[in-house]
Image (tube, rainbow, N blue to C red):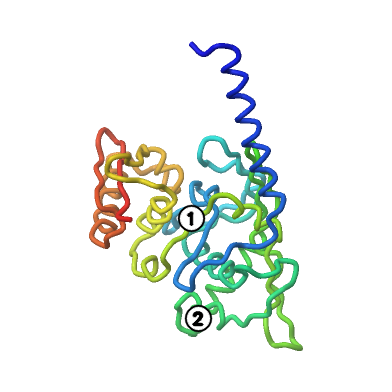
């Protein structure tokens, strides 16, 4: 049993760590730089149901201050239409333009510029889907609360057409830099583009947010995956097990994971690098 002096020392160290984290966050003014073939997403977002799976035939739900499911230690309140993996791709593309930029100034982009970064052709359907995603992202407000961080803002604060420039004026919340100040996940964009299926795409991001090795694998219950990936509540756990197995097998074949197993509805995995 720890002595009172030891407990006080642990509490002091924990308090000091929280204060250090708060200081780092307070000083963050830019997104970090990352390579052209990478994308980046804050860990609080990637380990939550904010960008879940699209459920075919189910209308998007409008939520107001809805507490989304996320990792222990965080609270996330969400207002807006439910977002899916396609919306995540668009948000990642917008963040990509703003990496290492002054977030208090807008960027002027054409829809074609964003489609290029997404790797999409410039057909009518892609233009319309892009604009729909941008409008959804613009309407979203999100509040993230933890021991050392409190972010309240939106994903995209401006997506307005400037007729004089013939481009869209795009801005993100400058406070977004604070979500990247400590921990964020880098994903390889060329790899993500080749992954089929929303569940595999969600798992790819989630897996990359962990330092998981064969000696120290990461673990997550299938019920938690069902919540965070926003799999239909009506889908029974035995079918979720089949879905996760199929998705993990494809990620293993792509070299994203080197090992995984599902035991007693618990997924264990190790990353390839």
Q: Position of residue 235 (x, y in %)?
A: 35, 44
Which residue is pictured at 49% across the width and 85% down the height?
122
Q: Which residue is mark 1?
A: 185
Q: Secondary structure beneath disc 1?
A: strand
Quarter containing the C terminus: bottom left
| Badge 2 or badge 1: first in the primary sequence | 2
Closer to the eye: label 2 or 1: 1
Camera-nearest residue between 163 and 100: 100
Camera-nearest residue between 12 and 38: 12
Q: Is residue 135 left or right of residue 45?
A: right
Total label count?
2
Q: Position of residue 162 (x, y in %)?
A: 74, 82
Q: Up-down: is 211 above or below 4?
A: below
Q: Secondary structure beneath disc 2?
A: helix
Q: Up-down: is 52 above or below 263?
A: below
Q: Position of residue 267 (x, y in %)?
A: 31, 41
Q: Is residue 163 left or right of residue 127?
A: right
- What is the spatial separation of the Cα atoms under label 2 and label 1, in whole angstroms? 22 Å
Q: On the image, which quarter does residue 170 sit in?
A: bottom right
Query: Label 1 near label 2: C-beta < 8 Å?
Result: no
Q: Residue 258 bears which disc, if any? A: none
Which residue is pictured at 49% across the width and 79% down the height?
125
Q: Residue 116 bears which disc, if any? A: 2
Crowding at dot 2, Cα within 10 Å, few <14 / some 14-19 / many 20+, comes out as: few
Q: Up-down: is 215 above or below 205?
A: above
Q: Is residue 131 left or right of residue 241?
A: right
Camera-nearest residue between 151 and 244: 151
Crowding at dot 1, Cα within 10 Å, few <14 / some 14-19 / many 20+, comes out as: many
Q: Position of residue 56 (x, y in %)?
A: 41, 59
């Amino acid at each position: 049993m720890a002595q009172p002096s030891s407990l006080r020392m642990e509490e002091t160290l924990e308090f000091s760590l929280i204060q250090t984290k708060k200081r780092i966050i307070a000083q963050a003014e830019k997104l970090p730089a990352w390579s052209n073939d990478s994308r980046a997403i804050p860990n609080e977002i990637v380990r939550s149901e904010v960008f879940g799976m699209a459920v075919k035939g189910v209308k998007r739900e409008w939520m107001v201050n809805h507490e989304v499911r996320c990792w222990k230690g965080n609270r996330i309140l969400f207002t807006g239409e439910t977002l899916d993996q396609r919306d995540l791709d668009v948000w990642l593309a917008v963040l990509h333009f703003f990496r290492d930029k002054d977030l208090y100034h807008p960027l002027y982009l054409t829809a074609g510029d964003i489609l290029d970064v997404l790797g999409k052709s410039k057909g009518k359907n892609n233009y319309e889907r892009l604009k729909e995603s941008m409008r959804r992202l613009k309407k979203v407000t999100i509040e993230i609360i933890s021991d050392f961080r409190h972010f309240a803002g939106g994903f995209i604060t401006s997506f307005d057409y400037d007729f004089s420039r013939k481009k869209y004026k795009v801005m993100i919340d400058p406070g977004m830099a604070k979500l990247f100040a400590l921990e964020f996940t880098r994903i390889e964009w060329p790899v993500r583009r080749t992954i089929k299926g929303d569940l595999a795409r969600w798992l790819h991001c989630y897996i990359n947010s962990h330092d998981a090795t064969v000696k120290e694998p990461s673990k997550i219950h299938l019920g938690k995956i069902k919540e965070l990936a926003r799999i239909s509540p009506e889908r029974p756990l035995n079918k979720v097990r089949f879905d996760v197995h199929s998705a993990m097998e494809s990620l293993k074949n792509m070299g994203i994971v080197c090992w995984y197993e599902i035991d007693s509805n618990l997924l264990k995995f190790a990353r390839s690098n």
